[in-house]
Amino acid sequence: MARVDLDEVRKVYPNGYVGVAGATFEVADGELLVLVGPSGCGKSTLLRMIAGLESISGGTLRIGDRVVNDVAPKDRDIAMVFQSYALYPHMSVAENLAFGLKLRGHDRGTIEARVREAAATLELDQLLDRKPGQLSGGQRQRVALGRALVRNPQVFLLDEPLSNLDAKLRMSMRVEIARLHRQLGATMIYVTHDQIEAMTLGQRIVVLDRGEIQQIDTPMALYERPANLFVATFLGSPAMNVLRGRLAREDGWALALDDGTRLPLAGEAGLREDWAGRELDVGIRPEHLQRAEAGGFAPTVEVVEPVGNEVFVNLRQGAHPLIARLPPGELPQPGAALPLRLDAAHLHVFDAGTGLRLDA
Ligand SMILES: Nc1ncnc2c1ncn2[C@@H]1O[C@H](COP(=O)(O)OP(=O)(O)OP(=O)(O)O)[C@@H](O)[C@H]1O
Ligand SMILES: [Mg+2]
């Protein structure tokens, strides 16, 4: 296995479009790193540059200790798994698994042993004689993974490998990939636009937006201390509430919204004097809007969504929609006012102009 090291790696497409603007990060040996971001942010471009399928316009890419900017894909010792499984329909599962090894001129004994081993790891033993057309989506996905596995590469690159599967299968394959990663101790770079997949699978996550890296950290660190408004609202479901306003200090702190409403805050932990009066975007995770007996503020309940173990309550405070995540129990009624408590300690405070976290 090997580490992967990117130093200001850039992609400018021939039409001048900047697909990736100077990406710098290192993937440690044996790490599972996730690249996440919305559609078109440059995830595949970045992964394809690492794979060698896309030329690098600037910067340095190393795999292990070797600079590979100009090394052909087949000589980079990587294996890539695509969203479209790209299996050969006329070949059996066994032949599909063996194909890449045959091309590389491995001997028959090695090929058979590696195919057997990969099939056992991925529980494909019973399916080796079938054609891809005779497999379920999840089984096909496992074959696609198996094709990468038999290569025993230094680095695995996976580009949205689960997005063709239904939600339930995606979840079980996710666990499968995490288990595989642990078992192999492999270096893996995993691309997804799905923030839940990113959070559950990544040891660290690189968040991309419009070709630029927004933040790199562990899942929980990203969730608890997003560096900017983009990361704050991209990770987390339901998404973080954001209110534009000013913090004011009188008999205690309050958040004054631009429509004149004042939301009193409980406590003052984490708040700084010099934030008062400044225009801010204030973020509150849905689980941090807690029910209160009295005091606080009381937005109007619009839609109640019970999901069993918790309840999402869609609210309106003047012009501002809010969402709260409450424990199950007595469901609030649409149209009623729901008293809530806003803890100062749970606020995420961003500059309204730059979107950057103020206490970063
Ligand atoms: N050959 C090209 N020429 C010009 N622009 C391109 C080219 N290929 C891709 N792009 C643009 O580069 C940007 C990044 O594309 P990329 O495929 O990396 O996005 P992505 O993050 O993988 O998105 P998705 O989640 O939809 O797969 C997009 O805006 C895309 O339109
Ligand atoms: Mg893509």
Image (cartoon, rainbow, N blue to C red):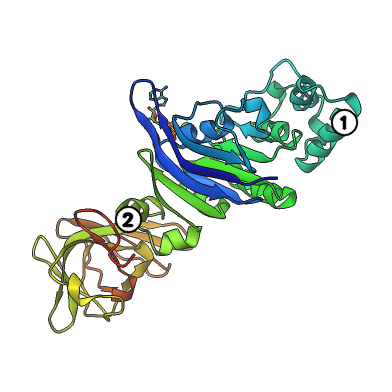
* Label of residue 79 in the image: none
- Residue 18 as seen in the image, left or right of residue 57: left
* Label of residue 228 in the image: 2
Where is mark 1, residue-wise? 110
**Residue 259 in the image: x percent, y percent?**
9, 60
**Residue 319 in the image: x percent, y percent?**
15, 56
Establish whether ligand 1 lies closer than 8 Å to the Cβ of label 2.
no
**Residue 150 in the image: x percent, y percent?**
76, 34
Disc 2 marks a residue whose amino acid type is: Asn
Residue toward you, 288 or 233: 233
- Residue 343 as seen in the image, left or right of residue 335: right
Disc 1 marks a residue whose amino acid type is: Thr
Establish whether ligand 2 lies closer than 8 Å to the Cβ of label 1.
no
Image height check: is 60 above or below 219?
above
- Residue 161 as seen in the image, left or right of residue 338: right
Q: Measuring 76% from the left and 20% from the top, which residue is drawn there?
A: 103
Whether residue 325 is visible, yes or no, is: no
Residue toward you, 337 or 47: 47
Farthest residue to the right: give it: 109
Q: Measuring 88% from the left and 25% from the top, which residue is drawn there?
A: 107
Mark 1 and mark 2 residues within 8 Å of each other at the beta carbon? no
Q: Quadrant of residue 320?
A: bottom left
